[in-house]
Amino acid sequence: MHRNSELIHKVNLSPGTGETVVVAMSGGVDSSVAAALLHEHGYRVVGITLNLWDYHASGGNFNLESGCCSIDTMADARAVCHKLGVPHYVSDFREIFDRSVQQNFIDEYFVGRTPNPCVRCNTFIKWGALLQQTEDIGASFLATGHYARTHFHAANNRWALLRAVDEQKDQSYALWGVRQEALARTIFPLGDLTKPEVREIARTLGLKTAEKKESQEICFIPDNDYRRYLRERAPETVAEIGGGDFIDANGHQIGAHQGFPFYTIGQRKGLGLALGRPIFITAIHPDTNTIVVGDDDDLRHSDFIVNSVNWGSLYCPPDGTAVSCKIRYRDAGAPARLFDAEPHHVRVHFDTPQRAITPGQSAVFYDGEVVVGGGVIDQFINDQIRK
Amino acid sequence: MNRIYLDYSATTPLAPEVFEAMRPYLTEHFGNASSIHGFGREAKVAVEAAREKLAAALGAQPQEIAFTSGGTEAGNLAIFGVAGTFAEPRHGVTSRIEHPCVLNSCSELEERGWKITYLEPDATGMISAQAVAEAIRPDTALISIMHANNEVGTINPIAGIAKLAAERKILFHTDAVQAFGKLPLDVRQIPVSLLSLSGHKIYGPKGMGALFVRRGVKLQPLLFGGHQERDRRAGTENVAGIVGLGKAAELMMADQAAESERLRALSENFWQRVQKIFPNATMNGNPASRLPAVLNLSFPGFESTALLMSLDLQGIAVSNGSACSSGSVEVSHVLRAMKLPRERAVSALRFSFGKYTTEAEIETTLEALEKILQRKSKSN
């Protein structure tokens, strides 16, 4: 018990004095502990579970109904709040989620990009519609169970997002879109904890969600089959696009594919091509419905353009600013430099070419543990052509 | 925190008198009303006494009352009970503002081949007898129009609709869940064929309702089993619930006129005061024909969920839309059918008052509401 109460107080939370904080509760262990920690530290907690989408509208295997947005998970979140003695609500954001996240997910694949819906959900739903609701009910802060931290840099008067202490669990990559004024109102109670510590706190406090397993990556595609989802949500567009050609770097046709939206940069499996050596998708051309394949070397590029940028600790940093750049969620990051920074745009140059820079995915720039900024990869610049 | 309950249209607390009336039938008088022995007899006597009380409240004969597990079952029994007596699918008339128990029963009838006309209400949420008359076809077999709407409180012209249905020999069901006990309704004056009601809206127990079935109206039962409720509803009687419903109906009738008047004055005062606090507020529904204790108000520029939460955080319970299984809310189908502008539909709150609502509670609520409405105005 002593050890656990130490754990609870290890959390780097300034003691609350009754400020109201909305905790976004998915019904999982992380957000449950986030709510419990804030409650223990003297905040007035209000739990809100987001109702974002319907299983019957998204299709797939109904037996997989276990992630967010099921009646069971709402009941779990409500039970945790009841145990803490705090109110709990369900907010219906299905319409805006469909418009801002699901429709964008579909649209992006249909222009040959690989979207990152969790980033958009954070930017437009949690730190958009939910933050608005937080303000509307007179609450001071919004908290979530994300593994990340925030810090105010007095030197340049900016808020920054920081990596979580637990690098295995760090979720700062998906949070780059949270704006300055939103970061100022955000609390991440789990940023200093490891996942095992979070579970231990949940057990100590007797939270029923203590042993719940991790949720899947894309919540609204519970069977993890985005191709099935695209076919069901947009059958006409899929039919209209139809199949196309695989071509090599020289433009020679070497096979047939099922339509460009069903493939992603760097993909090796499921191409149906037997060339006697490993080959990968290196580019997708939606205008001609052709997909370029090549060797591993053809996948590597140094320069790319990032749009929809949201600057964090630095605003429009000067040319040559050195960062570590992550171009996918599970990625250690690689040394890079930033150029041509504008409010919503930047060009990135990797010191050494990186594999599978994928348009539609997020690029996030770090200075150590600090998020300098992030955005959406628009296009990579083909080194051969540039030379 | 002292909590204030202003959601009497959703449900009501059990009246202490009702609880006392029910208690013996949850404890020592536990008999099965179908049993021949003394335990059974005392239960049976209680069931029939309650049936008489409920019948008296409606001007009905006791044998015209069938007890059910609630308003939803009563509505289902009316609709599927009638439909089950026709060998071929027929036509039915209902409205867009019905409770889901009627709307979803009608859409199930459509699955089974029936044709249903869904009448659009006017801007105040009212269905006219004229509109019903125009929807009737030669094969129309059932009309189902609610007495008073649960969300906006608008009272429909049931007498006129019942009269025209009777003239054309079409069965007419009215969902009187919100109106029963609160508005005078005598089935000797108003020729409805079927009328459904619920216990928990009138300070009676949840899980308890009844269907008035006019003598001569044939119904196919929903449940098959024993011969309870004159073969209209199988299953061992919920004796305590039935006793509670009978007692609740009796209490409602005892001071209906006076309590209606008190609630009308209270809600009228509340509405006047709200307009002073927030001049842009609007009332949804029919000011001239509404349940005295229901106020559906819009606060343009606000979002009803946030208003509801803000009030709840201060212990004040009101409603927006209708309660749903997950606790989440969609824009109400009733306000949509009334073609309310979006700004009004998304900012609508329902305040519903009841017999335990006090002047002091109204004052506290107005103070809280004023602070909430000012907070947002400042931040804008």
Image (cartoon, grey):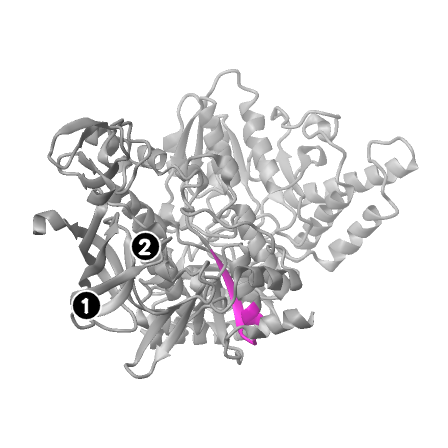
- Say which chain tag 2 marks: B
- Say which chain tag 1 marks: A
Which residue ends up furthest to the front in the rendered image?
A276
Taking A223 as reference, is A72 above or below it?
A: below
Q: Is residue A125 left or right of residue B224?
A: left
What residue is rendered at 86% in x and 32% in y? B35
In the rendered image, residue A339 lying in the magenta stretch gets the answer no
Taking A326 as reference, is A259 above or below it?
A: above
Q: Position of residue B15 (x, y in %)?
A: 70, 58
Label disc, if present, on residue B342 of the rendered structure: 2
The residue range painted magenta reads: A37-49
Q: Closer to the camera, A351 or A215?
A: A351
Position of the N terminus of chain A by quadrant? bottom right
Q: Is residue A361 left or right of residue A220?
A: left
The residue carrying pointer 1 sits among few (fewer than 14), some (14 to 19) or many (20 or more) residues within 10 Å by Cα, namely few
**What amino acid does circle 2 point to?**
Arg
Q: Does residue B6 appear anywhere in the picture?
A: no
Residue A250 falls in image quadrant: top left
In the rendered image, residue A43 lying in the magenta stretch gets the answer yes
Taking A293 as reference, is A71 above or below it?
A: below
Q: Closer to the camera, B93 or A115?
A: A115
Q: Closer to the camera, B334 or B174?
A: B334
* Pointer 1 residue: A343
Q: How far is mark 2 from mark 1, CA to CA?
A: 35 Å
